[in-house]
Image (cartoon, grey):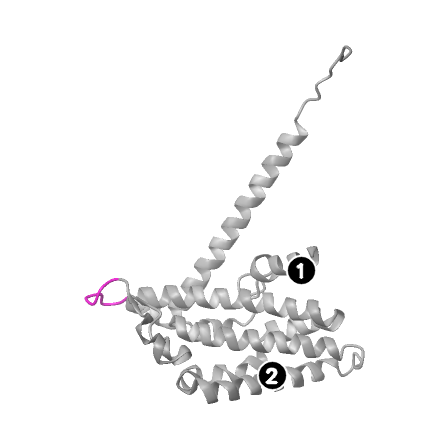
Amino acid sequence: MSDYKELSVNGLWKNNPALVQLLGLCPLLAVTGSVVNALGLGLATMLVLVGSNIAVSLIRNAVTDAIKLPAFVMIIASFTTGTELLMQAFTYELYTILGIFIPLIVTNCAILGRADAYACKNGVLPSAFDGLMMGLGFLAVLLAIGAIRELLGAGTLFADMHLLFGASAASWELNIFGSDYKGFLVAVLPPGAFLVAGLLIAIKNGVDNELERRAAAKRTVVKGSKRVRTTGNVA
């Protein structure tokens, strides 16, 4: 159980692919103009990550080091193609909006990195869990950037969610700043994505530094504690 806890902490926080490893930044910065775009690409990436980790784990003893990377790329490409076809079938309008960044999931370094660093050395279940946690960590960062950019850029949240969840989600849009809000243009443009991503990385580093400072202070108190000697007989 501790291994799965460690995988969860690594994927969601300590070794987050977007905030710590800084992998997959191209789609992360390019399509996070709204929550629905971020959610669509995040779910597609997570699906490919889990599927490829499972497949790589299954064949890990059947491929040599000389051909493992080409085999991994073929596996990732197969799952990406399947995901792309699913999006064409069920969320075609969102698929056209995300455009080239769906097939480019093949080149996402986070997916190939997990296949080579973890899945090819571990069993199916832990590899699937590692892919799920890494995918969730990547998805969480996508959603945070998408929400901040949509809020600052258009003053709304969850706009156009019907592209992903159907007509019933058309009423999910929240107009936070009212209809008179003019929008903050930089948040919509690509530089806005860099600024928001940098802000999230700074916040994470600040939280980590504060947690480390508190842990160090706690260790110092323990080291400085004095031993109390008790004497006499206890009846």
Count of number-bearing discs? 2
> Residue 138: x, y in percent?
53, 67
Q: Indicate the secondary structure of the residue bearing disc 1.
A: helix
Query: What amino acid is at disc 2?
Result: Phe
Q: Quadrant of residue 36?
A: bottom left
Tell me the residue at 40%/70% (across/down): 35
The answer to whether residue 163 is seen in the rendering is yes
Task: Please give the range of residues in magenta.
Answer: 177-184
Q: Nearer the viewer, mark 1 or mark 2?
A: 1
Q: Which residue is mark 2?
A: 79
| Figure quadrant of the C terminus | top right
Any mark on residue 194, and which?
Answer: none
Tell me the residue at 56%/41% (across/down): 213
| Figure quadrant of the N terminus | bottom right
Q: Assess whether residue 215 is covered by the magenta stretch.
A: no
> Residue 222: x, y in percent?
65, 31
Q: Indicate the secondary structure of the residue bearing disc 2.
A: helix
Above or below residue 117? Residue 7 is above
Alpha carbons under labels 1 and 2: distance apart: 24 Å
Q: Residues within 10 Å of mark 2 (few under 14, many from 20)?
A: many
Q: Residues within 10 Å of mark 1 (few under 14, many from 20)?
A: some
Query: What amino acid is at disc 1?
Result: Tyr
Tell me the residue at 49%/81% (across/down): 101
Would you say 235 lies left or right of 138 here?
right
Any mark on residue 4, and which?
Answer: 1
Q: Quadrant of residue 14?
A: bottom right
Of the two numbered discs 1 and 2 on the same chain, state the one appearing first in sequence: 1
Would you say 195 lies left or right of 119 here?
left
Kindly report the secondary structure that dominates the magenta region of the rendered protein.
loop
The answer to whether residue 26 is seen in the rendering is no
Tell me the residue at 66%/57% (across/down): 6
Q: Assess whether residue 183 is covered by the magenta stretch.
A: yes
